[in-house]
Image (spheres, coloured by chain):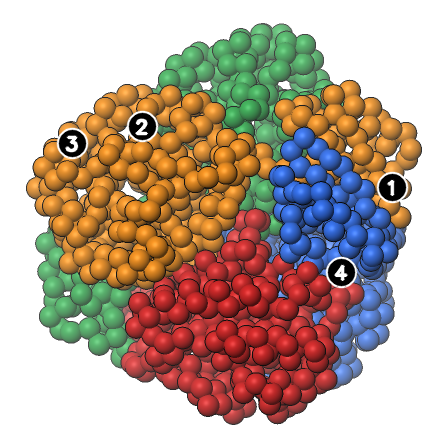
Chain colours: A green, B orange, C blue, D red
């Protein structure tokens, strides 16, 4: 970190800062410029918190952090790409995995029919919410364990793997029994208690980016899971909140090459939530693959117009299948299979 | 809601939409304009979800929601201001309550000394975190129940009431035993499981606005708590995330008169998190009162430069006391006590 | 537009609104719901401004616009894609055009050498700023007409076409003499005086999206140029401002399929400004093509580390050439040439 | 500035950077940390641009700017508050000036009647647009010079001073003849050509903050005007663009104490645009004064419901007058007159 002193900081103010820095077992490198004095702090990052309060000391203008706060999630910690094993599948390698299915598990028929169709179109993982985070308390909240059982049945019937969301620490136990990949949703990206809970589970975690989370905060959320012992984290860009209102969210595809540069973790994209209108999902899915995504999360419903949630952003199986054909060509250009 | 058909929508497409609307027990009012046909939907709002999928029907351009989705939290539901009873105090009436104290409960001495000083300066409620949501897994995570006991001891010693955060559904039970007001933090504003859990508690809930929550989403979070049976919700504006980087957040004081217009719930402001630098906290605290806030949440630390968290935005007791003097004058102009 | 009355609006308030609407030559369709009365307004959109003030009338809750405010730029106005003729080139057709070159024209040698190299790599248009919008008054402001002459010389030498920015109404005359495409920059997207000035010119206009412009506002800026008589507008997505700080901007690729849906105008992307770091430019360029972009604007400098501006986001000719090879493959998958 | 090298940067990469820094006449202070090497750059800031390209050099992770880029506008340059003389008035001193009037000059009657009424309520400056920046080319664009003449007539009739916007470099000459204060609008905050033009004028400039301008960029726009010789700049916070849609903009009152800390220039607020609904304007006006604003810009119209623009955010004279009474009390608490 760098401590910037105010213009005209007094010698004793500068010395007081140096004393605090050195007292925390860190080194202070002082650069006296024409305009301002700047103090570089070097040493064991674990001691940094002890000097963060420095910003309040007299004569201090501001503290500028320099180093990345995440460790286990960083490329510095691990140079090669992480391959995340999810059941029999590997996420992050040469094969792009498409996770497809309805927003919510609604019924046995709906789920099994969708599963069959996305399987046929080339998806390898079935998505479907049994516990649903809904903006309104009056909206459908999910079939809960009954939904999990239906997902397991669909897996049995099709051979697809399963990804489903957990929202409550108390439900982690039951969700992990059924699913292959545990999803932590956007609204829970900084639900640190939940992150700690899934850090103890031996299933991979699909970590969605928070609605207004910076890439650094997102990687820090991954760090929570990894620090607890679960290194199998799949990052999922799903659109951030911006001022634009025509689209539901703003799918930040910049995050894909950036996370792959900063981290060794695999990154997938969710264009369905990212743009929020089915019409534009194929274009964004293609773009995500071209940007380097390791996979996709796509909402598919056999009858979007009667879906209990997210119908407007769901593809029907025919459109999904056509999209998959295009994605295969882009994947090939990227040197990957799909 | 209003259904906007595409330019050139065919008659049978329009009719299909009308059929769906009427099939859901709703009325369709069709307006055929020169450019586009628009269908107004009238009827019991509880039937609306059934027609939401309409956006996917052929010939439909978009759905425009018209009515507010919140009910119990709305002024329409309750015309007069809600007075929230918190222990012996009333939030939302003629008295502005200042909740002050450290970001985190660190030790017995720190907390009791701070409590005494904020009490003397005129605060009526002591704030202090026993469970801390921290961006980094390597940061101090709170004293947990030990912290709650210290808060209770400080209440005993000073007569102050207490507000403290709960992050985990499993901790609601113990937190409610100790505190007068339960705080739901920014990062948990859409932790719907937690909202439901505190909706069953007979303690008032201080609901912080999410980092990127619209006012409507924030009121929907209050609706979750109210729908579960707990009508004692205090809204707390604490700064939203914008592109500005000089301040930690952007305290959105617009939200104060707006929430008081749309809802009957009391609204307070947290200028400490809202602007993130102690130097500017008094100005924003004054502005919040002038905008109509019913109270304030202020971080105060006996030694901000050694605070374990949020030192840069904490006032020391001397500055806090001076600020309170100024706030009293603004409160008086607003026809309130402090 | 739809006029939403407050809950409990009085009959005479509703009638007053109807009177105003009808007085403006428009029709009012009244829907009386259980909760609120809603009035749909139908008729000649040119009369709408006369009833906009309605929002202030007693009993009115809000006005909800329904129809798109842009006409000439809309797909409703023109169903087929517009092909913009720029010199001998056609933008918006089967060929993807890459516009490449330095941020600023710095010298004859720099420009000609860059021109030769981007030409060889497959670019068809040379970009280069002669008039530079710089955040600081102390930064290099461009070579002005001397820069334009160098651009013309580079065109002569290479056969490339030219695109360059105009910032001042008074400079439109001279810029149009030299350039094939006139660029209106991000910061001038709502410089309406400049938009009107270029609307009288017989050269195509490349219109960059404003830093925080919604897609609708961006299309309204195009409408300004088209309403003045110049229908040759090329839309350019170049990154919007979000809360993310790791990237310079957030390239909003969602805008590409959305603009192509709402409008008939061609759309290109500027990944150099969009992400702001050269390392990530190829990934975003590929993604833009896969999302459906009609072209790209790429910063290339023979020596990025000594560039007078935007070095960090500029590719050197070797990296640019390698990127072009990848883009060609994506373009082919998209059924286009490059 | 600080240059952060990548983890594992090689010795020769570090040396190459040092050579470049020293070659630009700057000093390099190298700190070799356990994780990364960091190079502090000290010396004449005017030489900084020459090393910005360093970010592209092999082994460089990023460049972190440390010092403020603005000089003339900074508190470092001038410690005491600037008092801006506008005709016979002083902005930035003990008197809070309220600038009130219609969005647009519509007619002689409208303007003179409004002028008389705002004068009577206590305003000292009349606002009114003669040149109007409108999102749509089909909206009323202003009365232009005829509007300026009417403003001058209103000044004659009431003794009020005048502030009006200039949008075009070619109109600066005529606008300055009529007005006491030249307004540069939000959409032109980074119209650098216009900033340079008004930097040569002997009239004070009211500089509105751009819709998505950081405080630093806003102060850099002021720097443009001051660098050209015109030190009489009044900063005007008018709301930034955020994700919130209920309010037209998000009035960022944090900017008031922050700008007054970083700069010596006076700062006023425009709550009319800032929140965009007349109902909430008085609350935000009070808050702005309480936050330390030196003045206000308020839209007042004798008949908001028939205003040609911005009716929804305009107060009528009766409400304006009532608001002024409240503001006087807040001003008094702040130790100021109004």
**Dot 3 lies on which element?**
helix
Q: Do the residues at discs 1 and 4 belong to one chain?
A: no
**Dot 2 lies on which element?**
loop
Describe residue B143's horizontal placement relative to residue C98 as left or right: left
Q: Residue at x 82, y 32 (%)?
A: B58
Residue placed under numbered mark 3 in the picture:
B152
For marks 2 and 1, the one nearer the N-term is 1
Circles 3 and 2, Cβ within 8 Å, touching? The answer is: no
Which disc is residue B203 wearing?
2
Q: Do the residues at discs 4 and 2 belong to one chain?
A: no
Which disc is residue B32 wearing?
1
Describe residue B46's horizontal placement relative to residue C246 as left or right: right
Q: Which residue is drawn at 47% across and 56% down?
A: B243
What crowding class fits label 2: few (fewer than 14 Cα within 10 Å), some (14-19), or many (20 or more)? many
**Spatial CA span between label 1 and label 4:** 20 Å
Q: Do the residues at discs 2 and 1 belong to one chain?
A: yes
Q: Which chain carries label 3?
A: B
- Of residue A138 and residue B192, the one placed in the foreground of this image is A138
Q: Quadrant of the C terminus of chain C?
A: bottom right
Counting from the top left corner in percent of width and height, residue D15 is at 33, 66
Q: Mark 4 lies on which chain?
A: C
Q: In which quarter of the image is residue B203?
A: top left
Q: Do the residues at discs 3 and 1 belong to one chain?
A: yes
């Amino acid at each position: 970190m760098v401590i910037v002193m105010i213009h005209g900081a007094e010698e004793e103010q500068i010395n007081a800062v140096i004393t605090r820095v050195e007292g925390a077992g860190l080194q202070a490198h002082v650069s006296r410029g024409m305009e301002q004095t700047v103090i570089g702090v070097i040493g064991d990052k674990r001691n940094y918190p002890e000097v963060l309060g420095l910003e309040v000391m007299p004569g201090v203008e501001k503290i500028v952090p320099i180093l990345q706060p995440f460790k286990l999630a960083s490329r510095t910690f691990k140079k090669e790409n992480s391959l995340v094993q999810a059941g029999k599948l590997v996420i992050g390698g040469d094969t792009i995995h498409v996770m497809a299915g309805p927003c919510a598990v609604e019924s046995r028929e709906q789920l099994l029919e969708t599963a069959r169709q996305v399987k046929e179109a080339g998806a390898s993982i079935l998505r479907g919410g049994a516990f649903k985070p809904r903006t309104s308390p009056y909206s459908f909240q999910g079939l809960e364990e009954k939904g999990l059982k239906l997902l397991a049945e669909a897996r049995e019937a099709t051979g697809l793997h399963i990804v489903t969301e957990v929202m409550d620490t108390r439900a982690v136990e039951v969700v992990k029994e059924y699913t292959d990949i545990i999803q932590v949703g956007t609204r829970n990206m900084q639900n640190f208690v939940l992150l700690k809970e899934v850090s103890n589970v031996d299933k991979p975690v699909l970590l969605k980016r928070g609605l207004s989370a910076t890439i650094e905060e997102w990687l820090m959320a991954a760090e929570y899971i990894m620090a607890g012992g679960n290194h199998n984290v799949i990052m999922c860009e799903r659109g951030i909140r911006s001022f634009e209102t025509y689209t539901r969210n703003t799918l930040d595809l910049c995050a894909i090459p950036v996370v792959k540069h900063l981290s060794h973790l695999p990154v997938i994209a969710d264009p369905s939530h990212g743009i929020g209108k089915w019409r534009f999902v194929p274009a964004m899915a293609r773009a995500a693959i071209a940007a380097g995504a390791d996979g996709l999360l796509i909402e598919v419903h056999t009858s979007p117009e009667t879906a209990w949630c997210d119908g407007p952003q769901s593809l029907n199986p025919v459109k999904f299948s056509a999209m998959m054909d295009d994605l295969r060509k882009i994947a090939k250009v990227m040197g990957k299979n799909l």
